[in-house]
Amino acid sequence: MPQPTTDENGHVAEIHWPSLIAATAAVSAVGIAMGLGLPLLSIILEKRGISSTLIGLNAAMAGVAAMVAAPITTKCAHDFGVARSMMIAVVIAAVSAICFYYADQFWMWFPLRFTFHGATTALFILSEFWINEAAPPRRRGLVLGIYATVLAVGFAIGPMLFSLLGSDGVLPFIVGALIIMTAIIPIFLARHESPKLDSKPERHFFHYIFLVPSATAAVFAFGAVSVGGLSLFPIYALREQMTESHAAILLTVMGLGNMAFQIPLGMISDRMRDRRPLLTGLAVLGVLGSLTIPFLIGNWMMTAVLLFMWGGCISGLYTVGLAHLGARLRGADLVAANAAFIFCYAVGTVAGPQGIGAAMDVAGNDGFAWALAGFFGFYVVVSGARWFLPTKQG
């Protein structure tokens, strides 16, 4: 396959579709498995009588794993290559997924969460770096919108599979592991097109967290509400007298909203010289949508409409934030910044499930919505402070 052509500044001149398809297809397979696995694992623990706080603590291991894996991923990609590192991560994630079924003791789920989410973190970092490198600057938002849409398809299919397979037996675990393994096919086929990292980042890993704060703070908020919400919404819905299948379908509806909104949001961001006001506006919609959930949860149809609109808007924090990051950096600095981006997402996934679970235990079921609003409100405050304390960074 031909390599992408570049302009005089070293940027990709046109979208290189083979690279985009390979990286997107790989991470989307993982998205399907995660969309299936997150509610599946939470429901199983709920049936075992585990408290919301402990379920949230176990889900938060995803963030701990990601925080450990993020800085390591950059080194592995430099030493072993992007494609080879991704294929190793696929195998680790698939084996970990099937092992959940055979782990009878609750404590065993903690190391399994660590290996599974550490591997998927590496896949996300390297796929997004690959996609950002394959995107021309003037169409970066569109490319990342396509990526986010296909990924949202995966996250929508996952809960749908959960509603069909249920939470009993080994079948949902086998299906999840097989789906993950399919990710290795597009990576292998496009392995010679993966980006080459001939140099190392110029700065220490943690410096990149603060280099583009509008992107990293946005993805922290998104990580908290996406993983925390996806893990604990089924429990919230069941306590509101909703059936397990209806709760799963609502998650699918939210995934459909993600699919519908990402390309338009990406195209809008491409027309903006500064993507930061768009990020702030999306966070404000996140606050408003979160606070509306308790008033509509008794009406399934109205809740579905809310989650469709709300889910699509808040996912833009990830897409637009990633485009904002790609517009600032490239090469080895971009892969390091992408690792920092995922690191902040991981911190959010630690804070989100634990914070939301604790809020439900302390404040009752409505604590679910209040905690979601709090995480979005954090980003609104951060972005507001940026207007009063402007910096040269993003």
Image (cartoon, helix red, strand yellow):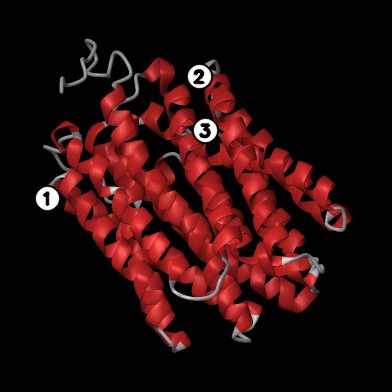
Give the CA distance from mark 3 to mark 1: 30 Å
Up the image or down, 331 lies above or below 136; here it is below
Question: Total of numbered circles in the picture?
Answer: 3
Q: Quadrant of the N terminus?
A: top left
**Residue 47 appearing in the image:** yes
Q: Nearer the viewer, residue 300 or 133?
A: 300
Give the CA distance from mark 1 to mark 2: 34 Å
- Of the image marks 3 and 1, the number of the one nearer the N terminus: 1
Dot label at residue 270: 2
Instruction: Indicate the secondary structure of the residue bearing disc 3.
Output: helix
Instruction: Indicate the secondary structure of the residue bearing disc 2.
Output: helix
Location of residue 28 in the rendering, given as x and y in whole percent from the top left corner: 41, 44
Residue 72 picture quarter? bottom left
Location of residue 116 in the rendering, given as x and y in whole percent from the top left corner: 36, 65
* Residue to which mark 1 is pinned: 80
Up the image or down, 268 lies above or below 362; here it is above
**Residue 67 appearing in the image:** no
- Of the image marks 3 and 2, the number of the one nearer the N terminus: 2
Residue 181 picture quarter? bottom left
